[in-house]
Amino acid sequence: MTDVASTSTSDGAEGASYCSPGVTRSSFLAFSPPSIGEEEILEVVDTLRSGWITTGPKSHRFESEFAARVGAPAALGVNSCTAALHTALASLGIGSGDEVITTPLTFAATVSVIHHVGATPVLVDVEPDTLNISPAAISAALGPRTRAILPVHYGGHPADLDPIGEMAESVGATVLEDAAHALVASYRGRVIGSGPNPVAFSFYATKNLTTGEGGMLTGTPEMVDRARIWSLHGMSRDAWRRYARGGSWRYEVVAPGFKYNMTDIQAAMGLAQLRKLDGFQCRRRAVAAAYTSAFRELDALEVPSERGDVESAWHLYVLRLNLPALRIGRDHFIEELTTRNIGTSVHFIPIYRHPFYRDCYRLEPASFPVTESNYRRMVSLPLHPGLSDQDVADVIEAVRDAVLEHRR
Ligand SMILES: Cc1ncc(COP(=O)(O)O)c(C=O)c1O
């Protein structure tokens, strides 16, 4: 492996030793461990020593620095992407009798928040190349009750936002983006999160930037101000502003809000991670390129593509198996990689396959042929900045070996 730049050792996994050169690592390669170094530790310790550990100066600094990084008009730190999505829907006044159009190929959180505000999730199929929500399918589902369209930038590849935005505008709906995977990504030259519509990011442990748990909502200052109130019990003033010198103990509750605020401990990690983000993204892109150049020539594999008008955040590397070329299915393929000490995952078990959503909304796989056929053949490979060149070589070797052993 010579075409991948080396990572620094402070964040990088150690190179593995071999029992069977080029095929099986002696140690298990975790799918997506966080890339944490001394910088994060020092920044968190600084907060612990500071006398202020919940929402305060570092949370507000992280919001400003994050907003500057993605070019957002305003940003609100919260304790998860789920919280950001829920807060956005609630502060937009979306609820009972309303419909929100979204994708079935996502994590449960995207849909649970729609259910929680009392609205109806309307799931539509995805596009075959990017696996993002299909504008044509949205168009068929659009109606007078549509209050929001909730695209997920699957794997970090932006959804086709222009037609989605036009359709939303035609019915007076909002586009609320689930950008859990999309830091940093851009669509037609616009960075995800830089527009006026609400966009929710995740800082969960596996994400491109982590605060352990955490999230950020970006949008207009007016929307973010409203969401800030919803995110903290509906209170008109947060604790830092009440307890600071010159602050007043008085506050009013103006909405039945949530307890979703980000702590300064989380923000401390975020500030340190933000300083490393460009390097992280550079490494992710290099690893993805190395995988693609190795797998592209194997007819049993379909590599992920990046459309010409976007820049993916490369949160996931989702390989698709060309099943007719293999004697085994996806689940067996994953077992073969596990045997070779390579951690993998599947993104995602489609929403309509989960008993709650299947039964509550009477969903059937036949309504989502593109999602269903791709779900059966997808496997996510390790993709994170801590991968050493040797790790990348090991993944490539293991995948190649499994394909060669089981091809028709
Ligand atoms: C697409 C998508 N949306 C939302 C979430 C929820 O993020 P969080 O764990 O920060 O609430 C995730 C988490 O993995 C996700 O993958």
Image: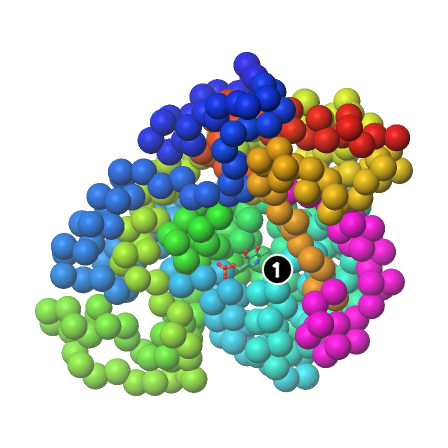
The quarter in which the C terminus is drawn is top right
Tell me what residue is drawn at x 28 percent, y 51 percent.
268
Q: Quadrant of residue 313?
A: top right
Indicate the amino acid at tag 1.
Phe
Q: Is residue 357 magenta?
A: yes
The vertical placement of 80 against 361, above or below, is: above
Residue that extends furthest to the left in the rendered view of this protein = 245
Q: Is mark 1 within 8 Å of ligand 1?
A: yes
- Of 319 and 252, the residue lying toward us: 319
Tell me what residue is drawn at x 37 percent, y 33 percent.
11
- Magenta-colored span: 353-380
The quarter in which the N terminus is drawn is top right
Residue at image mark 1: 107
The vertical placement of 3 against 376, above or below, is: above
* Ligand 1 quarter of the rendering: bottom right
Tell me what residue is drawn at x 71 percent, y 72 percent.
355
x and y, in percent, of residue 51 in the image: 14, 61
Q: Quadrant of residue 371?
A: bottom right
Q: Main secondary structure of the magenta part?
A: helix
Residue that extends furthest to the top in the rendered view of this protein = 2
Coloration mode: rainbow
- Of 58 and 317, the residue lying toward us: 317
- Of 157 and 64, the residue lying toward us: 157
Report the side of 315 relative to 238 (left or right): right
